[in-house]
Amino acid sequence: MCIFVARNKHARRYMKVAVVKYNAGNIFSVVHALKRIGVEPILTDSPEQLRSADRVVFPGQGEASNAMHYLRERGLDEVIRSLTQPVLGICIGQQLMCRHSEEGDTDCLGIFDADVKRFVPVKHEDKIPHMGWNSIQNYKSQNSKSTLFESLDGEFVYFVHSFYVPVCKETAAVTEYIHPFSAAMQKDNFYATQFHPEKSGKVGQQILKNFLEL
Amino acid sequence: MLAKRIIPCLDVKDGQTVKGTNFLQLRQAGDPVELGKVYSQQGADELVFLDITASHEGRKTFTDMVQKVAAEVDIPFTVGGGISELRDVERMLNAGADKISINSAALRRPELIDEIVRHFGSQVCVVAIDAQEKNGVWTCFLNGGRIPTDRNLFDWAKEVNGRGAGEILFTSMNHDGVKQGFACEALARLASELTIPVIASGGAGRMEDFRDVFAQGHADAALAASVFHFGQISIPELKTYLRKEKINVRI
């Protein structure tokens, strides 16, 4: 575990950003992306560190049942659910924040009142995983009052996923692939993106900055 | 709608980018990390870094470069060259690569594809195929186009697809370095027979070639090197042109 003091050069103040350390792939790319905007994140699985952070990022790429098993074993499921500061789930992070996932028939954290489904191709061109750059539409739903994506309507972001969250009352942005799905979600202090802001060029960087400046 | 991707390819030797013409003469074209950042700022959708000397020399320089790219570049990137076992894949992913590409190693031992997919997921595994057409038959080649095999392009591509690879990067050796357009017919056949994305490589010379590879070759992505490295085509200009030609690209 490596610990740094976080500094957000844009807000010109010290900010402690924790990245949840667990058995998912590609966590370092989020750490790099945060560093590029002037933050020195803490990569940690310590409940105390997570609770005391100003912002928590819950990233990753991986398989839902293994990830949930790992989080439960360490009590991190309860920790993440009870966080009160802004939390950003990314990719599998968004999916794990839902109620249930079809991937490995997994009960997830239940922060969002939605279930994760597997993409089913309709025609030959529908390739799974949905991989590459697709555009997001800002979406106002019942529970989501997110401002993370307000200025980014129609912009392209980078996706890699085979499972998706349908459009629901916590949807904050919509993308169309085979059918419309939740590209981003929000409920209270919990934010999530199905896409990878850390790999989405300038647009992704803006979303991370927006999250830090909430 | 999912955008068609433009992918500059950087061949790397001893930490510097080079580009061969028809896989032979090499010319110097800059620092790969800096070049990668410039391409990302210009609107490249992904980058590919190929370690063209991996089989002959030490790989530490390349791994160091991959770490720097991961720290400084904010778009996805694939690394290839000399990856022949799971340990190599793991090293590249740990260094921060998003995907790895395998070529000769997959032809020699196709089970490697299944192993990579099982351990790291389909999306990580790009299988590169170098093939040459002669009398209407497309044959796959090993070792950067030096050694012919008895594999047919379309049969091998289907097997790669079936083993769970995430993407195929197809280079036509007939078209590579000639700058007269991509192998659109073969690409269109691959697109119709496969269920995974195809990245077209070899033959980019003019902006029209990119339009054709998407419109006629039905490629999901187009990869090129020298036209970008030597400034013959700039990515912003190319994307504006493709938009005008009704190709969905990210701008």
Image: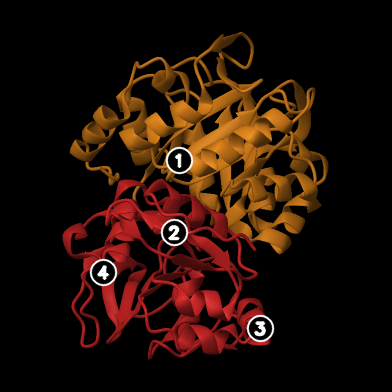
Is label 4 or label 1 in front? 4
Quadrant showing the N terminus of chain B: bottom left
- Residue B27 percent across, percent down from the top left: 55, 10
Identify the element where label 2 is drawn. Answer: loop
- Estimate the spatial distance between the alpha carbons at disc 4 and disc 1, rounded to whole Å: 25 Å
Q: CA distance from mark 2 to mark 3?
A: 25 Å
Q: Is residue B93 visible?
A: yes
The amino acid pointed to by label 3 is Arg
Say which residue label 2 marks: A6
Q: Are marks 4 and 3 on the same chain?
A: yes
Shown in orange, the chain is: B
- The amino acid pointed to by label 2 is Ala
Q: Amino acid at mark 1?
A: Val
| Disc 4 target residue | A214
Q: Is residue B74 above or below residue A73?
A: above
Q: Give me the C-alpha separation between circle 3 and circle 1.
A: 33 Å
The residue that disc 3 covers is A74
